[in-house]
Image (spheres, helix red, strand yellow):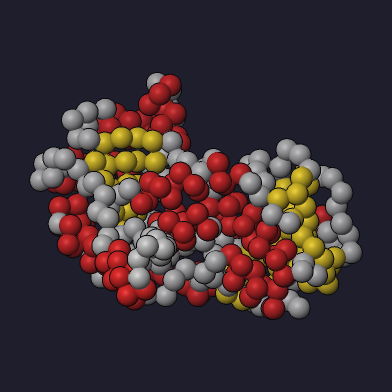
């Protein structure tokens, strides 16, 4: 198929970006799907706000105003239905909805959707259930980038030729059974406006006093820049002020990293404290950390229930007391941590983007 993919967000990125620097979950997914679709014989052209024309993972990337194909088999637009106006002649149209779908009901969006009648592509059944319109839809589970899938795999087979096959089997069995236990580190990745100040209070008042050697790493661009520049928006002033009272609480604010480096961060941590939000139905970084086999703790908001297998790959907690108790247990008890790591082996593994692309290709063949 001749496929055109469209994104008009003001973020400059291409198919290589997420490996080396942080990228929003929706944009990273968009780039990943583009490359994966080419693996099934599709000719994929991506039009977005990339700086230069280039080839990335088999897909042609072009700035959104250049070289717009017109007669195509399939157009996939990210989020914004107005993008279909750029390629009016297409056999099939898909709007990839990665947020709460209620925005589709605005007067402007409803008018455009009525004109082009695309099929909607959702991430989960839960997200699709929030859509109240009449357009046909399909649910296609998103993949996870290989950096995270590889980081969650057990060590490779021992191949020392000096060992017999019997001895080799025993050595491999021992290697598989042994799970390396990282230092007592918890990490946070979500938007600081989504209750981060409350999480810092919980850490300072309830977790760190019981586990003084534990460390909390907060990955946030806006907070990292604010603390280093001394200039911050009023929307996070209370958060910054409170953080400055946590000098002795072993909290480190870090700028988010590309996939390769973030996969290492997940490997070197014991638990992901995920700040759920009722509008966050995708939970992109939680998908990445779960693929890396990092146990998580979160409340049941947004799409968390679709990602954490409760009591196996993490805990979906009802209140702060439960969060504190389980977090301390994971950070303090090696056997409890390793039992959660083993829980990933009994759950369905995350899809690769190639599998996602195969499903997309089959639907619109």
Q: Which of 170/269 is in front?
A: 170
Identity of the residue drawn at 15% across and 57% down = 333
Indicate whether 329 appears above or below 248.
below
Q: In the shown orientation, is residue 117 left or right of residue 268? A: right
Residue 34 position by quadrant? bottom right
Identity of the residue drawn at 51% across and 44% down = 258
Q: Position of residue 4 (x, y in %)?
A: 78, 60
Q: In the shown orientation, is residue 181 left or right of residue 303? A: left
Q: Which of 297/79 is in front?
A: 297
Identity of the residue drawn at 19% across and 43% down = 214
Q: In the shown orientation, is residue 243 left or right of residue 18? A: left
Identity of the residue drawn at 73% across and 38% down = 51
Q: Position of residue 361 (x, y in %)?
A: 70, 73
Residue 290 visible in the shown view: no
Question: Quarter holding the N terminus?
Answer: bottom right
Residue 23 position by quadrant? top right
Residue 25 visible in the shown view: yes
Indicate whether 174 appears above or below 7.
below
Q: Residue furthest left?
A: 210
């Amino acid at each position: 198929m001749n496929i055109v993919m469209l994104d008009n967000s003001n973020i400059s990125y291409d198919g290589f970006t997420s490996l080396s620097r942080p990228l929003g979950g929706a944009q990273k997914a968009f780039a990943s799907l583009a490359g994966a679709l080419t693996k099934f014989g599709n000719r994929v052209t991506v039009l977005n706000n990339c700086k230069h024309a280039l080839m990335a993972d088999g897909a042609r990337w072009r700035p959104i105003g250049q070289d717009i194909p017109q007669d195509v088999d399939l157009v996939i637009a990210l989020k914004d239905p107005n993008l279909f106006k750029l390629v009016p002649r297409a056999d099939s149209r898909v709007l990839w909805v990665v947020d709460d779908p209620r925005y589709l009901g605005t007067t402007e969006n409803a008018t455009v959707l009525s004109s082009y009648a695309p099929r909607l592509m959702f991430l989960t059944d839960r997200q699709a259930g929030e859509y109240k319109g009449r357009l046909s839809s399909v649910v296609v589970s998103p993949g996870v980038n290989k950096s995270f899938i590889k980081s969650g795999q057990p060590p490779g087979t021992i191949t020392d030729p000096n060992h017999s096959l019997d001895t080799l089997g025993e050595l491999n069995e021992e290697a598989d059974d042994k799970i390396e236990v990282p230092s007592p580190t918890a990490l946070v990745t979500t938007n600081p406006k989504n209750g981060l100040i409350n999480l810092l209070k919980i850490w300072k008042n309830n977790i760190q006093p019981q586990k003084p050697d534990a460390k909390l790493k907060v990955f946030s661009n806006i907070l990292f820049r604010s603390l280093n520049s001394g200039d911050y928006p009023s929307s996070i002033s209370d958060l910054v002020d409170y953080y400055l009272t946590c000098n002795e609480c072993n909290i480190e604010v870090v700028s988010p990293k590309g996939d390769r480096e973030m996969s290492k961060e997940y490997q070197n941590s014991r638990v992901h404290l995920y700040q759920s939000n009722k509008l966050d139905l995708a939970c992109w970084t939680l998908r990445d950390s779960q693929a890396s086999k990092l146990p998580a703790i979160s409340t049941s908001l947004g799409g968390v229930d679709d990602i954490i297998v409760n009591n196996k790959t993490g805990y979906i907690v009802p209140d702060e007391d439960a969060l504190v108790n389980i977090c301390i247990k994971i950070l303090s008890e090696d056997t409890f941590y390793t039992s959660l790591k083993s829980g990933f082996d009994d759950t369905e593994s995350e899809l690769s983007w190639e599998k996602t692309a195969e499903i997309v290709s089959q639907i619109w063949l």
